[in-house]
Amino acid sequence: MAAHRLRPCVGRLFGMGPELGSGRRAYSAFQAFTEVLRLPSKQLTKLVFPLQELHGHFVPGSRPDLHLNIFHPSLEDIARAESFFTASARNRIEYLTSAVRLDHAPDLRRPEVCFIGRSNVGKSSLIKALFSLAPEVEVRVSKKPGHTKKINFYKVGKHFTLVDMPGYGYRAPEDFVDMVETYLKERKNLMRTFLLVDSVVGIQKADSIAIEMCEEFALPYVMVLTKIDKSSKGHLLKQVLQIQKFVDTKTQGCFPQLFPVRYSRTTIR
């Protein structure tokens, strides 16, 4: 995944020995970034910076109007991001509570980031992967869409609260609009919204409504492309360029770079 704040499997970079970057150990789910760094350079780029790898499929000079906004954090930044999601005695990561309406939500002072998306887009899987270094935190993942029915709050140390919103579209809760729209509009400590879009099918009508809410409420948000390994590189590149153009021309509050994540049965990486 290209985004360092969404990278679910990053590890400690600091204090590592000279063997860094060597070795041929295969990547597996929930692997720390220290292990990922041992992969050959090409595999490392493919896993950590997939947009950069995808950019190599452009035909030079063919379409000057086409471009990819590529965010390239340093490995030190990625390692620091992992420390936020690494559970320890001094960095407690835990489920806090659930709410069905904003007036039931906990009164928290720390910043909040929330995740929203269509049912079955992979939101719960992504959050589960983010908490892979805090295995005591249970995030239920279901094969059936519409599993999340409440607003779920998770404490991420002293840094922020992660908020898992119910999915919109198929099997959404009956009071979804009141629940989610009220939260997005009125939650004062909401600092960033991560809006998940299925990269196989692109932006759907339900996604457009969620985007319009973020724009109307002047929320800073990031578009996350899920399941990037479910399409051919040609189809994925087409979708990425179309969504990138949409972000460039029709949004004001969206972060200019798309954050892609891979899908793998039990986790997203």
Image (cartoon, rainbow, N blue to C red):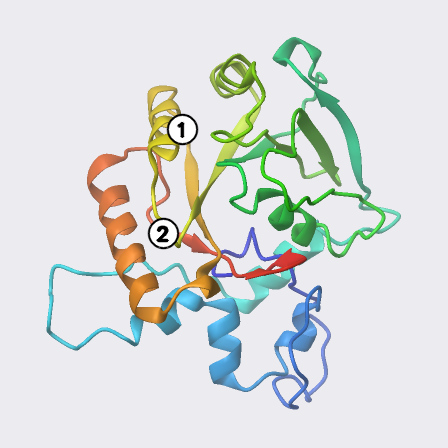
Relative image position of residue 47 (x, y in whole percent): 52, 71
Q: Nearer the viewer, residue 147 or 133?
A: 147
Amino acid type at image mark 1:
Ala
Q: Residue 97 location in percent, x, y?
A: 77, 25
Disc 2 or 1, which lies upstream in sequence? 1
Which amino acid type is marked by label 2?
Gln
| Residue ranking furthest to the right | 89
The quadrant of the rendering that contains the C terminus is: bottom right
From the viewer's perspective, is 194 left or right of 214?
Answer: right
- The residue closer to the viewer here, 111 or 103, is 103
- The answer to which quarter of the image holds residue 9 is bottom right
At a point 85% along the width and 48% down the height, the residue shown is 136
Residue at left offset 18%, top offset 76%: 59
Q: Secondary structure at mark 2?
A: loop
Label 1 CA crowd tier, 10 Å (few <14, some 14–19, many 20+): some
Where is residue 92? Give x, y as percent: 82, 42
From the viewer's perspective, is 61 left or right of 260? left
Q: Measure the C-alpha gap from mark 2 to mark 1.
A: 18 Å
User: What residue does disc 2 label?
Assistant: 257
Query: Which residue in the structure is indicated by mark 1?
Result: 210
SS assignment at label 1: helix
Q: Is residue 257 above or below residue 33?
A: above
What residue is rendered at 70% in x and 12% in y?
A: 104
Quadrant location of residue 53?
A: bottom left
- On residue 83, the disc is none
Q: Nearer the viewer, residue 13 or 198?
A: 198
User: Which is closer to the viewer, label 2 or label 1?
Assistant: 1
x and y, in percent, of residue 212 in the image = 33, 26
State yes or no: discs 2 and 1 in contact (Cβ < 8 Å). Answer: no
Residue depicted at 74% across the width and 43% down the height: 139
Q: Relative to residue 182, is residue 1 depicted above or below?
A: below
